Image (cartoon, grey):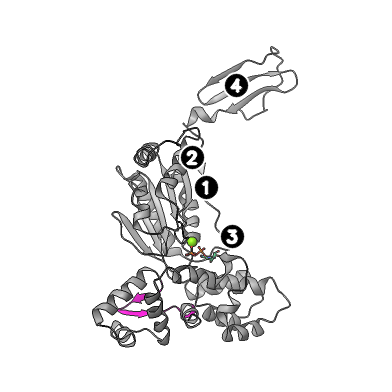
Amino acid sequence: MPPMNDQPNTPTNQSGGINMSGGQMHVDGDAVGGSKYVIYQAARQAHPRTFTIPAPPRDFTGRTQEIDELVKLLTEGKRAAISGTISSLTGMGGVGKSTLASYVALQVAAEFPDAAMWIDLQGMNDNPLAPTEAMRQVILAFNPLEDLRKATDDELAQMYRAVLHGKRALIVLDNAHDAKQVRELLKAECAFIVTSRRQFVEQGLVLIRLDVLQENDARELLKKLCARLTEQELAQLTELCGKLPLALRIAGSHLGTRPNESAARYIEKLEQQRIELLSEANDETLNVEAAFALSYDRLDPETQRRWRFLAVFPAPFDANAAAYIWKTELDQAEKSLGDLVRESLVEFSDGRFRLHDLLRDFARGRK
Ligand SMILES: Nc1ncnc2c1ncn2[C@@H]1O[C@H](COP(=O)(O)OP(=O)(O)OP(=O)(O)O)[C@@H](O)[C@H]1O
Ligand SMILES: [Mg+2]
């Protein structure tokens, strides 16, 4: 196909005739502009491609294993005859779920020529997005002129599944509140990435628990944010931030944007008052305390009290120890710990529980 404006000037009729064929539009030229060849998108696909994935940060670091796993799941799922793959990323606030989802979605976007959509389910807000609202967004992305004002919930669900039927589409459902919010959405025939602080199980959902960054990746991210840090300072900051990406970004950007501030002095202050220093920004997305409070505030008062008590353990602990300080039966302690693990406020590995260092500091600061 000749590129636009690449034709010799051939004077033709003044009205400028238009021919359309094979996804290409030919407009007869006038004496000034010449003939023009334009790709006629609508003839190529039924709708313009929907792409609403936010770009990941330029300094994206690490996560090679999780990226491989997610890319494999998503690209294999795309070939599945009946339904796409559904991968779910869970983990504590600020651990990098949304960032990883956007990075992976961008990597595989070419495999999903019909749509790559990002929907914020606002699961940590007081009013999470209704599933039907998310459906509306999808339907309108494919059929912008559809009048949905009178559609019932059932009709919306049917239309939602119908527009995605046979499409090669990827939908990121970011920040899911719980299984109920995503259940109907996941019934569509496409690939999904779901992110949530809450761990929940749904049919066909492959759960990927996201942990803090690896030591060397955490240091690398800090180095990208503030090149002047020495090896010792990088090690100290990595430790003080508990390798949590949100905390690393806050501390690294703080020093990176203040070249005159002594890193050693900042580290000293961090040792005394981590949560305060990592929560100075008015920007809620760069504030550790605000990020943790979203999870904490959702607990009922009794669970909040129990969770705060866990801050007495400086090291990993078992359910017996929790039952002892809570003065409850072991069964009850195990149930409560399970609930807190699902909220990503307590970590569980090798049969023991622990609080992330920063969460422990946060818990100690709460009454
Ligand atoms: N792999 C990474 N490389 C560089 N920066 C990262 C990485 N992962 C996360 N970050 C940074 O850490 C911060 C928190 O990340 P993100 O918002 O993805 O966390 P989250 O797990 O989605 O948190 P929430 O539960 O609050 O939604 C962001 O500023 C992000 O840029
Ligand atoms: Mg997020």
Residue 355 lies in what quarter of the image? Answer: bottom left
In the picture of the structure, the residue carrying the numbered disc 3 is 58
Label 4 sits on what residue type? His
What is the x, y in percent for residue 356?
A: 44, 78
Q: Can you tell me whether the CB of the residue at mark 1 lies under 8 Å from the nearest atom of ligand 2?
A: no
Q: Can you tell me whether the CB of the residue at mark 4 lies under 8 Å from the nearest atom of ligand 1?
A: no
Marks 3 and 2, how far apart in space? 28 Å
Query: How many other residues sit within 10 Å of disc 2, few (<14), some (14-19) or many (≥20)?
Result: some
Label 2 sits on what residue type? Ala
In the picture of the structure, the residue carrying the numbered disc 1 is 52
In the picture of the structure, the residue carrying the numbered disc 4 is 26
What is the x, y in percent for residue 50?
A: 50, 41
In the picture of the structure, the residue carrying the numbered disc 2 is 141
The N terminus lies in which quarter of the figure?
top right
Q: Secondary structure at mark 4?
A: strand
Q: Which residues are magenta?
A: 345-358
Q: Residue at x 41, y 87 (%)?
A: 312
Whether tag 1 and tag 4 are in contact, CB under 8 A, the answer is no
User: 117 or 229, which lies in front?
Assistant: 117
Whether tag 3 and tag 1 are in contact, CB under 8 A, the answer is no
Query: How many other residues sit within 10 Å of disc 1, few (<14), some (14-19) or many (≥20)?
Result: few
What is the x, y in percent for residue 345?
A: 41, 73
- Say whether disc 3 or disc 2 marks the residue closer to the N-terminus: 3
Q: Nearer the viewer, mark 3 or mark 2?
A: 2
- Say whether disc 2 or disc 4 marks the residue closer to the N-terminus: 4
Marks 3 and 1, how far apart in space? 18 Å
